[in-house]
Every structure is written in structure tokens, then in C-alpha cells.
Amino acid sequence: MDQPQLHPNGDSSLLIQWQADTSLALVQVIMACCDAIKSAAIKGVVECVPAYSSIMVNFDLAITTFDELAPILAQYLLDDPPPAAAVLPIVEIPVCYDPSLAWDIIPVASQLGVSIDTIIDRHCAPTYHVYMLGFMPGFLYLGGMDPRIACPRKMTPRKKIPAGAVGIAGQQTGIYPFESPGGWQIIGQTPVSLFDIARTPPVLAAALQPVRFVPITALQYHRLTQ
Amino acid sequence: MSYGLPAAGCLDTYSHWLANWLVGNSREAPVLEITLMGPEFEIHRPVCVGITGAVFDIFVNEQRIDSMQTIQLFAGDRLRFGRLLNGCRAYLAVSGGIIENAIWGSVSTYLPAKIGGLQGRCLRKGDPLYSGPSHQIHRELPNSLRIAIKNKVLVRIVDGAESVEFSEAARRELVSQPFTVSVDSNRMGCRLQGQPLIHQSPQGNMVTTGVAVGSIQVPSDGQPIVIMADGQTTGGYPRIANVITADRHLMAQVKPGDKVSFYRVNLAKATRIYRQKQQFITQQLALQCT
């Protein structure tokens, strides 16, 4: 794995960017680097936000700058992946793929030239892993999606997507934990809560945790949301 | 933010600071953010308040009063916000800060997840607000700190993470046309309308990465979105530029129909501007207290 590059991301943020394809191994390296940077408690660092192939580091511009921080951070970027983490239990997420709730499943199926059932089968077959959380509290970015159901984001993001919407954007699939604007293609809807501030931890799954989707009918969905 | 919970908090951090100064609070004490339309309060105990940011007609017991100075209020008084005269968001600080339970160290409300503040929601008629005790303080904002809010603003930017992926024409467009603030703007993002900004790659998609407040994202329709404090912590639309930290408060004060023009500076300049502004405000406030 090549050494990552650091670039400014505005005047009080920087990105540590790996040039590598998304993979579980890369996420493990990224999570380990994030932990190392947090433990180092570097002066001026406010926050570290890991993603598929990057870490965003936000800092206090009154205390430090990109030029000062970059060489310090570089020391914490590991060469070798960390030892394999403990096995985490699989989280099963029920999803209703009925077009009444899966707003884009018909156009996506049509665009890909396959049936809706094929989309469902391909979406439910893999064991995914949580690669990162972000976008909104509890939003799970999942890796391991079948590339045959990949499709681009919507050209104009929707102003409102309901809580629990399951989407695809490019090679990625994820779930919207709250009503929000967004540009993902919505292919399903889950009745479970992705984020509960009173719960410990508040999120449904953590980075590197395995996840599976389980199809449910519209009737089952409506029973579960009563 | 690694759980996906954004920073949230006041969009106009300078007005937040100044409102707290007017009532002798620490800089970060919780305040009310008042957007476009203002509330009316019944006062039950002596309290002092400070109002900064957007300018509204303000009345105490139906007598007009100026904001930008400490206002002493007593039991039985009514404080009423009237018409908005300029800007978008006013900030109301009360002596001792607004008292609510902190979640993860913050009293801020994050509406999309219904977290924080008063039960995670907007304030409603009949809601009680608790403040600390009043004290004998009278302060006025010096003229040097009364920022004139206009409906056409010039906001400074630095290059973004994906600036180079936009065409030369797009990068020129960004700084040569005024954009109009769309009605679809809110605390998550300020949507701007203007000539579309074209990204080199047709889909304009990229692998999801962390998004900083102030980033200017451009989806495929070419209409830029300035990410605000409640905005998504990660995203996949490319960023053509970032609003400098020192100018983020300007974005908090524009409303639908207002015009925003951008002006590019380099990182060193952005850093200097921020630090000088912090120093200037600190000095001006210290002068008032002598």
C-alpha cells in the first residue's frame, strides 16, 4: 500500500488521502491511523473523520496550520496493516424493496437491464462490512456490494429522503438514518432505527462490523412500523 | 463527527461571541439563534440579554429598543421581536447562558436527529427558558464591531480538495458572477443559483470523503452548495472551493434572494485574516471594558 498524501481542505481542515481501491484492509489501516492520531492528542487538532480512503483532520486555525500539522501527522501514518481485529457479530437489517417505498428501484432495474428481483437478490446476497460512518449520525457506508448493481447518484439531489431509506450511489450502498436531502438512488426502506443518542453506542453498527440485508414484504414493513 | 454527527452550533460564530460578551458570559455559552422571524418573551425574573447579528425591530413593553447593547429586563416585562430589517439570523444571549442539559458536551440543537437543546426541537409557544441570574453590567458594541449586513456579500474562498478537477471556465465563473441564495437553503447547506459550474468528469462523482464546514460542493447540475454547521460530515460531490473560516459568518446572514460573490485568496492570507480578526475583536472588546 502506498503512503498517503496530505492536502489542504479549506483553511482549517486537511485530507489524508490514500490512492488505493476501497477494501476492508484499507479501512483497517485507516481506522488504526485514526486511533493513533486521536491518542496523540496533537495541539490544535479538533476532529478526525475517517472515510473509505481518506481521513479528514479538522483543526483550530488560531493554533495551527496545514504547513505545521502535515509533517506531525505524517509520523502517525502506518506502513503495515494492524493485526486482525476481534470478530464482530453480524448485524441483520430488514429491508422492504417494494416500489411503493423503494422509489428508484424500477428506474434502476431498467437502467441496468435486469428485473427488480435480480436487484433484490444481488443486494441481499453479500455479507457487507461497515467501512465508515458519516454523512449524518449513524449513516453506515457499506463495502462489499455487488458491482453489477452499481449506478450513479442522481443528477439533482432530492431535497427530502425519508429516515430508513436504503440507497445506492456509484459502487456504494448505505442507509439514511434521518430524513435528509441526498442524491442516492433509493432501492429499499428499513424500519429499524440507525441512530439513538440514548443508546450505547448510539449507532447500529461500528466500522468494520459485518452486516446483511434481509428482505421483508410491504405488509411486514408496515407491521414493524406501527 | 466520526459517528456522522455534525459540529452544529451557531452559524454566525462572531455574533454568538459578541452576544455573550454583552451579558458577561463566556464566549461559548448557549444562546438562541433566531432566523428570519423573531419570538416574544414573557420575563419572570430579572435577567439581562444581548442581541446581535441580524437587525430586527425590538420592543420592550412595546417601546422600541436598540440591539447591540446590554438590555436589563425585570419580572413582568415583555420582549418582542418585530420585523427583520437586515441579515438572516439574530443571536440572543442571556446572563448565565441558556440552561439545558448538555449532550456530548454541547447544548446545541441538531434538528434532523432531534438531538439537543430543548428536546431536540424548535422552540414553541409556552416553552420555558432558564437563564442564570442577572448582573449589573452595561455594555455596548463599539462601532468597529457593528458589522453592516447587506444583501449582497463578498465572501473569500480558498481552493478546494477537487478544485483542479473543474474546468478553467468553471473556476473563473465561480469568482466572476454573483450567485443567488435559493429558498432551499437551511442550516445544512446554503444552495446557490447561477451559471452551472462544469466538472471535467461527466458524472462528477467521487468516493465519499470527509466534508468540512464551508466547503462548496458542486453536484452534477452545476449549482453550488455551501456546507453549513449542520451539514453532512461526509459526501461525494466534488468541492470547487472552501469559504475561509473568517468569512463563514457572512454565509449565516444571507437569505433567499440575496447575492453572494466569491473572491479567491491563498491559504496564508486566509490564515492571517482569521487570526487578525480574532485579535481585533478581542482587543476591541477589551478596550470597552476599561
Image (cartoon, coloured by chain):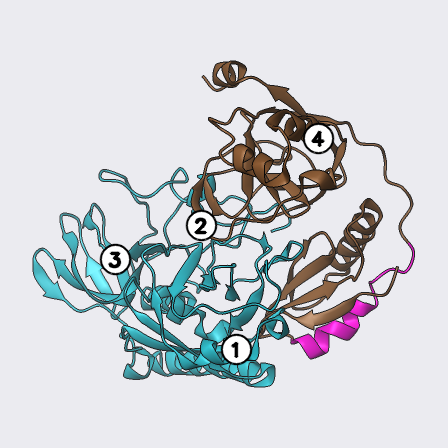
Discs 3 and 4 lie in a common subunit: no
> Is any part of residue B101 visible from this angle?
no
Is residue B24 covered in magenta?
Answer: no
The chain containing the residue under callout 4 comes to A
- Give neighbour class at mark 3: few <14, some 14-19, many 20+ (Cα, 10 Å): some
Name the secondary structure under disc 4: helix
Q: Which amino acid is tagged 4?
A: Arg
Q: Which amino acid is tagged 3?
A: Leu
Q: Among the chains, which one is brown?
A: A
Is B87 rendered above or below residue A176?
Answer: below
Q: Which amino acid is tagged 1?
A: Arg
Give the mark toward the camera: 3 or 4: 4
Q: Residue at x 51, y 59 (%)?
A: B219
Percent coordinates x, y for residue A94 in the rendering: 62, 23
- Give neighbour class at mark 4: few <14, some 14-19, many 20+ (Cα, 10 Å): some
Measure the alpha-carbon separation of dots 1 and 3: 32 Å
Front residue of this view, candidates A150 and A113: A113
Give the mark toward the camera: 2 or 1: 1
Q: Among the chains, which one is cyan?
A: B
Name the secondary structure under disc 3: loop
Measure the alpha-carbon separation of dots 3 and 2: 19 Å
Q: Which residue is mark 4?
A: A122
Q: Residue at x 49, y 81 (%)?
A: B172
Q: Which residue is mark 3?
A: B36
Name the secondary structure under disc 1: helix
Front residue of this view, candidates A111 and A186: A111
> Is any part of residue B26 visible from this angle?
yes
Q: Residue furthest front?
A: A113
Measure the alpha-carbon separation of dots 3 and 4: 48 Å
Percent coordinates x, y for residue A122 in the rendering: 71, 30
Q: Which residue is mark 2?
A: B108
- Give neighbour class at mark 1: few <14, some 14-19, many 20+ (Cα, 10 Å): many
